[in-house]
């Protein structure tokens, strides 16, 4: 997404006169308001159905329902959200809105002469946040993969009586042979060897009792 591209916009505003002015300002910049809603109820479903590039919400202050709907949308169908208000929100209100996924919080309404700058800012902020989110997800995945690999190596070492390097080579060869990620093979090894350990314990107990 580029801020210079024409955007398909979902507009939320219960004030029809104000919405008309905002719509005109957006169209002058080449954007299209594809849908207008009076409130944020069912926002995630509306976004999934209409697939807008951006959501613009114009209201006095973000109430609890709006915050929850924005947060849900940001979790399941993230895209830039511009929140416009004519009310001076306090720090906690603004913080809550940003935490819910708002990319640009505009406190003096969406003025026609500021539309381009606001949209540019919202798109840039959104893309920066998404890049950060992707990086964090990749880091978490890498950590989880490492835990699985270390656990699988430990089980192989115990079962085969080999050292860490040999256990790793077993995992690596299996991953290459099956064209799978190392972590996927590690999880399979864990499932198999831990299952063997679980079933072997009752068997040994019966043998000792007999």
Image (cartoon, grey):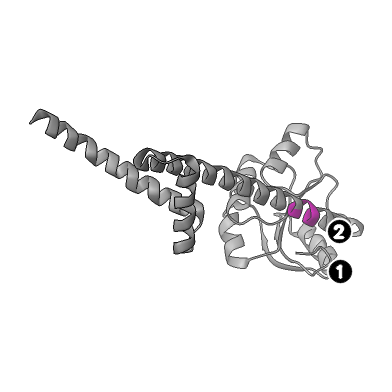
The secondary structure type at the circle numbered 1 is helix
Q: Are marks 1 and 2 in contact (CB under 8 Å)?
A: yes
The secondary structure type at the circle numbered 2 is helix
Magenta region includes residue 196: no
Q: Does residue 81 appear in this view?
A: no
Residue at the disc numbered 2: 115
Q: Which quadrant is home to the C terminus?
A: top left
Magenta residues, start to end: 122-127
Say which of 166 and 75 sits in front. Answer: 166
- Where is residue 163? Give x, y as percent: 46, 40
Q: Is residue 193 above or below residue 172?
A: above
Image point (83%, 66%), residue name: 24
Q: Is residue 199 above or below residue 35?
A: above
Residue 13 is tagged as none
Circle 1 packing at 10 Å, graded few (<14), some (14-19), many (20+), is few
Image point (73%, 37%), residue name: 95
Q: Does residue 145 appear in this view?
A: yes
Q: Main secondary structure of the magenta part?
A: helix
Q: Does residue 49 appear to the left or right of 61 in the view shown?
A: left
Q: Is residue 205 above or below residue 146?
A: above
- Where is residue 6? Give x, y as percent: 79, 70
Q: CA distance from mark 1 to mark 2?
A: 9 Å
- Where is residue 23? Give x, y as percent: 79, 64
- Where is residue 185? Give x, y as percent: 44, 53
Residue at the disc numbered 1: 28
Q: Tell me which label, 1 or 2, sits earlier in the chain.
A: 1
């Amino acid at each position: 997404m580029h801020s210079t591209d024409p955007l398909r916009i979902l507009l939320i505003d219960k004030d029809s006169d104000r919405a008309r002015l905002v719509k005109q300002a957006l169209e002058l910049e080449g954007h299209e308001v594809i849908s207008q809603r009076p409130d944020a109820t069912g926002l995630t479903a509306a976004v999934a159905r209409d697939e807008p590039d951006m959501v613009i919400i114009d209201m006095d202050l973000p109430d609890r329902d709006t915050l929850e709907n924005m947060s849900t949308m940001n979790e399941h169908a993230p895209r830039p959200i511009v929140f416009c208000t004519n009310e001076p929100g306090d720090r906690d209100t603004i913080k809550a809105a940003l935490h819910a996924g708002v990319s640009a919080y505009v406190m003096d309404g969406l003025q026609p002469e500021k539309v381009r700058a606001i949209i540019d800012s919202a798109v840039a902020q959104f893309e920066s946040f998404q890049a950060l989110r992707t990086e964090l997800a990749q880091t978490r995945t890498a950590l989880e993969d490492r835990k699985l690999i270390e656990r699988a190596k430990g089980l192989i070492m115990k079962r085969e009586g080999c050292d860490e390097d040999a256990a790793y080579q077993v995992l690596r060869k299996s991953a290459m042979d099956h064209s799978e990620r190392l972590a996927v093979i590690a999880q399979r090894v864990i499932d198999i060897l831990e299952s063997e350990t679980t079933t072997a314990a009752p068997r040994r107990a019966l043998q000792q009792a007999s």
